[in-house]
Image (cartoon, rainbow, N blue to C red):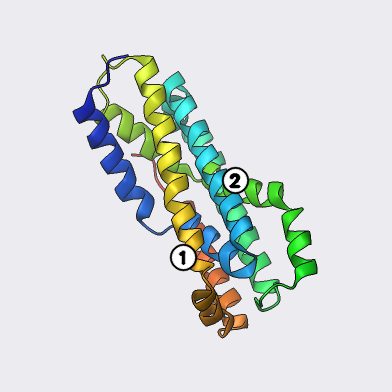
């Protein structure tokens, strides 16, 4: 396998810049960190990273082009994503104020690992902007002569990079002094995160094909 390192570095830089820009994924990991614990946040981060593998797979198979060019398919994905974010917003607004978990609550949280994983997976998967972003990345930065095995490696590296970033976010926001600061906000934390999800839903609903 011959890797075009300049192409690889350019692709990873573009993806990395987009990854650190706060969006639905960041808001979800932040909420999991404060409302639950580091374990939940890390499983949510793993779900987000795994979703990247799905986006990358259908992009390499050419399915992403079909979704990107089909107004019907794009709108179905767009409204599904917006509806999911509204659901998350309602759940956040109805949740009790975040507080430090006791041992029994922590045990219950650990039984919800797959639920936390699914939360992150769906948050990223149902984002129509992710479809367009992957199409733009691979059509503008990846040569048509790049081998399929190299492209698969690109996608794997993107997934690892995204997990590493959100793992760092999870660790930071589950640090004791950071969590204590958020706990002092009480219900305002739920209100702010709920409103954030609503605004993100509106942004997704207004997304257009390019």
Q: Residue at x 19, y 29 (%)?
A: 6
- Whether residue 79 can be seen here: no
User: Considering only order in the chain, which callout, 2 or 1, is on the residue closer to the N terminus?
Assistant: 2
The kind of secondary structure element at disc 2 is: helix
| Image depth: mark 1 or mark 2 in front | 1
Q: Nearer the viewer, residue 201 or 53?
A: 53
Q: Is residue 111 above or below residue 160?
A: below
Q: Quadrant of residue 4?
A: top left
Q: Is residue 32 above or below residue 123?
A: below
The residue that disc 1 covers is: 172
Residue 25 image position (x, y, % from top left): 49, 54
User: Can you say which quadrant of the picture contains the C terminus?
Assistant: top left
Q: CA distance from mark 1 to mark 2?
A: 23 Å
Residue 154 image position (x, y, % from top left): 37, 29
The kind of secondary structure element at disc 1 is: helix
Label 2 environment density (alpha carbons within 10 Å; few <14, some 14–19, many ≥20): some
Q: Residue at x 73, y 60 (%)?
A: 109
Label at residue 122:
2
- Whether residue 73 can be seen here: yes
Residue 185 image position (x, y, % from top left): 56, 84
Q: Nearer the viewer, residue 83 or 75?
A: 83
Q: Is residue 51 above or below residue 26?
A: above
Label 1 environment density (alpha carbons within 10 Å; few <14, some 14–19, many ≥20): some
Label at residue 209:
none
Q: Residue at x 61, y 83 (%)?
A: 186
Q: State the count of labels.
A: 2
Q: Nearer the viewer, residue 159 or 90?
A: 159
């Amino acid at each position: 396998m011959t890797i075009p390192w300049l192409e690889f570095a350019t692709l990873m830089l573009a993806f990395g810049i987009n990854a650190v820009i706060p969006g639905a994924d960041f808001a979800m990991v932040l909420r999991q960190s404060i409302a639950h614990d580091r374990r939940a946040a890390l499983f949510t981060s793993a779900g987000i990273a795994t979703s990247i593998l799905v986006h990358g797979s259908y992009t390499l198979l050419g399915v992403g082009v079909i979704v990107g060019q089909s107004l019907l398919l794009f709108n179905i994905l767009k409204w599904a994503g917006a509806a999911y974010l509204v659901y998350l917003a309602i759940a956040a607004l109805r949740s009790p104020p975040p507080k430090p978990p006791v041992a029994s609550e922590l045990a219950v949280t650990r039984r919800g690992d797959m639920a936390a994983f699914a939360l992150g997976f769906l948050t990223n998967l149902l984002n129509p902007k992710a479809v367009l972003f992957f199409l733009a990345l691979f059509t503008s930065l990846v040569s048509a002569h790049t081998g399929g095995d190299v492209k698969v490696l690109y996608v794997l590296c993107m997934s690892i990079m995204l997990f590493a970033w959100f793992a760092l976010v999870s660790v930071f926001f589950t640090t004791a002094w950071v969590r204590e600061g958020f706990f002092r906000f009480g219900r305002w934390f739920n209100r702010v995160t709920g409103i954030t999800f609503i605004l993100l839903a509106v942004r997704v609903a207004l997304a257009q094909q390019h």
